[in-house]
Image (tube, rainbow, N blue to C red):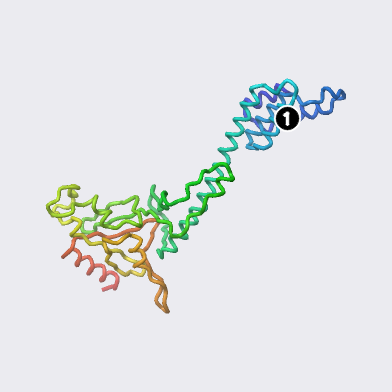
Amino acid sequence: MSNRAACNVALRQWKQVLKDTSTIIALAAANEDPSKRDPPAKALFRAAQALAGLGKWDEATDAIERGRKIPGEEDKAWWGTLITDVEKGKKADAERQERNRRKTLTEQAEKMAVAAHGLMVENTPNPPDNPHPLHFDPSALSDVPLYPPEKAAEWQVPLPYTPLIFPVFLMYPQHHTSDFITHFHEDTSFDEQLAPIFPASPSATSPPWSEWDTAHEYYTSNLVVYVETQQRRLLKVGKEITLREVITKARRDPVGSTPRDGIVLRDGLLSFVVLPKGPQERKFIDEFKRARDGK
């Protein structure tokens, strides 16, 4: 039975190991000779291995402590090695559970933050792949270790006003193309986000002009930004104010028969239209209003 337990340890069949070692330990305890009732050290060692394999860390530790008390086993290195493995496993298991707990609570907090912002959430049946979902600014989060538990308990759920970072589409309907900003911090402005994409003036050479902008109309001082709300209001966005302020200004609470309204967060993404000032801007506005009003 001892050899079978050893084989099952090699096969990682932990439940079978416990079954065999429990029988060995019980037989020893029932020995008529009191001097032979101590559990065999190998049986306790293999039982501890099995308990650790099943993630029963406290029980594994107890088995190790019992094994160490057996005469002649006090200084055996294998117990120290096993207790180290158990402590590592216990820590890894606790960290995994704490990480999952924080992930669940943070996702709930993100939903509350989105609602507090007044965004209108819409999810489609076939959302696009988005490897950069909205999330809280990591630098604003509670930096508390996952282990030990008494320290991990100090972690705090992010509050609704914790800064969010959004994935944002910038659409250029004139050229049927777009840019995707993966990390648009809500406390930054469109001026800050557009600066790395477009030249600042007609004479600027850095950053380079977009290949599709052959007329060189898309430079930051010549650009306007628009956003459509859920109730199909078309709002001009102040490029100098932060995204948070844009979202707040677009928010409309329900009053009487006037429904609640705000910027749409569709499949976790925000979308804005970017145009050059002048004829293209006026053309876009006219076409939008005709489509909206059915004219």
Residue labelled with disc 1:
66
Q: Amino acid at mark 1?
A: Arg
- On screen, residue 16 above or below 93: above
SS of the residue under disc 1: helix
Residue at position x 18%, y 55% in the image: 219
Position of residue 211 measured from the top left corner of the image (x, y, whole percent):
18, 48
106 left or right, relative to 195: right
Quadrant into which the N terminus falls: top right
Q: Quadrant of residue 191?
A: bottom left
Counting other residues with Cα less than 10 Å from the Cα at mark 1, is it few (<14), some (14-19), or many (20 or more)?
some
Q: Nearer the viewer, residue 178 or 40?
A: 40
Position of residue 92 measured from the top left corner of the image (x, y, whole percent):
56, 38
- On screen, residue 185 above or below 229: above
21 left or right, relative to 89: right
Q: From this viewpoint, which residue is outermost toward the bottom?
A: 256
Quadrant into which the C terminus falls: bottom left
38 left or right, relative to 116: right
Q: Nearer the viewer, residue 88 or 225?
A: 88
